[in-house]
Image (cartoon, grey):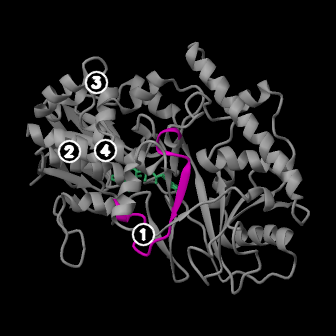
Amino acid sequence: ADVTASVIVVGAGMSGISAAKTLSDAGIKDTVILEATDRIGGRIREQEFGGLNVEIGANWVEGVNGNELNPIWDMANKLKLKVFFSDYDNLYANTYKQAGGKYESSFAQSAFDKADDLEKFGESVSKKLTATRQEDISILVSQRLKNQVPTTPIDMAIDYYKYDYEFAEPPRVTSLINTQPLSTFANFGEDLYFVADPRGYSSVVYHVARQFLTFDKSGKLTDPRVKFNKIVTEIEQSPSGVIVKTEDGTVYRAKYVMVSVSVGVLQTKLIDFVPDLPPWKILAAYQFDMAVYTKIFIKFPHKFWPTGNGTEFFLYAHDKRGYYTIWQQLEAQYPGANALLVTVTDDESRRIEQQSDEETKAEVMEVLRDMFGKNIPEPTDILVPKWWSNRFFKGTFSNWPIGVTRFEYDQIRAPVGRIYFTGEHTSEHYNGYVHGAYLAGMVATYTTDSFKLIPSLTQPFMSCSGIDSAKILIRCAKYGQYAGTILSQRV
Ligand code: FAD
């Protein structure tokens, strides 16, 4: 017989788990969570690599030590996750030339200062455009306005560090008014902490899951409501309910469905919506960008790079912008492991995903020989995650491109009949982040039109909101406890 539930949640990443927990807190416990892979966590994923547990997806808690508490930071503290403050202040002393050797510190320092000024200029342009309700421009256009488009290898490396390393797309693509300043750092603080815990960063997802799902004594998720290896291929809605079909031929029926797959997956035909989603919805979702950010881990028999204070991050300034630019040595996180992490994005990520790991290794070694000389050992291991070619992700996180207005962004998360949407790409202020996924999951269950989903919530949120419910609800929902309190009072 078909499986029935009140709400089917598609995807068990941070946002799907957060949405299901919010529903559970509101008394809606007969949910079914359909997950394509064999685990919860989605894009927060640890992987064994040469005896280490490395994070191939999200790695940092971003936005810490500010005015507001990042809910993920709160969880990391509660779980006592092993975290490492990321100090980028010494990059100027660790910037390597393509031809070998480092740039002189004072020269590099002035290049960084210039880039900081350029960034501040961009923020001021952004504020002016917003205040006068003018159209968006790209970050690159703001650089042109100051006649300071980065063109030398060092200026491009710094520019890549400032923008591509955060957004995984170049300043030519990225929206100025929606990213400068960025809410994550403006609200939660400027600091970043790197998670390197044997339990994995996905512990934060388990932390949310444990509050409403059943686990056995060994810590294994045994809750029958979570179905693994269930690839949703069709969602059909009618006035009376939804029918969700999976690749293995199982049929699920429910009153509502909450879709948490990435915007990259939404842009493919993996899930067929019957009837088709309306044109406004498709246009909005297809305009947003699914960026690609690739973290290549490499292990060596011994270290040949500087270690100690102020050496963790270093830059390689190639004349091709974004060519193996950002490096991190992981001595603090994985002592004695002789591990490096190099990050590539966008076109480089897509190129690298299509070649063999041997070819990537050869490129990486050439770059390392440029920086550290010919006499360096061959690596013992290399790990090249492939998020872009994975049909359940199609990239790593969303980036706000120029051309998408706030109105269109709201359309991306708006429900269509009985189909609701969550995921990091639906977070009002924090798209692209773990905290965005978590907050979006909570909010998706009770944004403006979704009172139907939790009827008992209509009252409190009507009074909580008044004018613009969606906005205020998000403020209400900033901390899990708060939303939880309101919910439980009413149920
Ligand atoms: P997902 O985690 O993608 O969850 C969706 C789930 O749906 C997945 O489990 C997927 O398997 C499943 N699914 C897909 N299709 C189907 C289907 N048809 N049927 C059933 N299930 C399906 N954020 C930070 O805050 N800090 C960082 O340092 C950081 N770095 C990152 C680095 C990388 C390489 C990546 C990949 C991401 C990074 N992020 C970072 C972003 C962060 O990981 C994501 O924003 C967040 O985890 C997304 O959660 P989600 O629930 O929205 O989506």
Task: For marks 4 and 3, give the CA distance.
Answer: 17 Å
In the rendered structure, which disc, 2 or 3, sits on the residue that comes first in sequence?
3
Q: Which residues are magenta?
A: 186-204
Task: For marks 2 and 3, give the CA distance.
Answer: 17 Å
Percent x, y of residue 418: 22, 33
Q: Quadrant of the N terminus?
A: bottom left
| Residue 388 - label | none
Q: Which residue is mark 1?
A: 200
Q: How many marks?
A: 4
In the rendered structure, which disc, 2 or 1, sits on the residue that comes first in sequence?
1
Task: For marks 1 and 4, give the CA distance.
Answer: 23 Å
Q: Amino acid at mark 3?
A: Ser
| Residue 469 - label | 3
Q: Which residue is mark 4?
A: 479
Q: Label 2 near label 4: C-beta < 8 Å?
A: no
Task: For marks 3 and 1, give the CA distance.
Answer: 36 Å
Query: What residue is rendered at 34% in x and 27% in y?
Result: 471
Q: Which residue is mark 2?
A: 484
Is 27 or 288 nearer to us in this picture? 27
In the rendered structure, which disc, 4 or 2, sits on the residue that comes first in sequence?
4
- Please state if 439 lies on the left or on the right of 173 as rendered: left
- Please state if 72 lies on the left or on the right of 17 as rendered: right
Is 402 or 219 nearer to us in this picture? 219
Mark 4 element type: loop
The answer to whether residue 198 is magenta is yes
Q: Is residue 388 visible?
A: no
Task: For marks 4 and 2, give the CA distance.
Answer: 9 Å
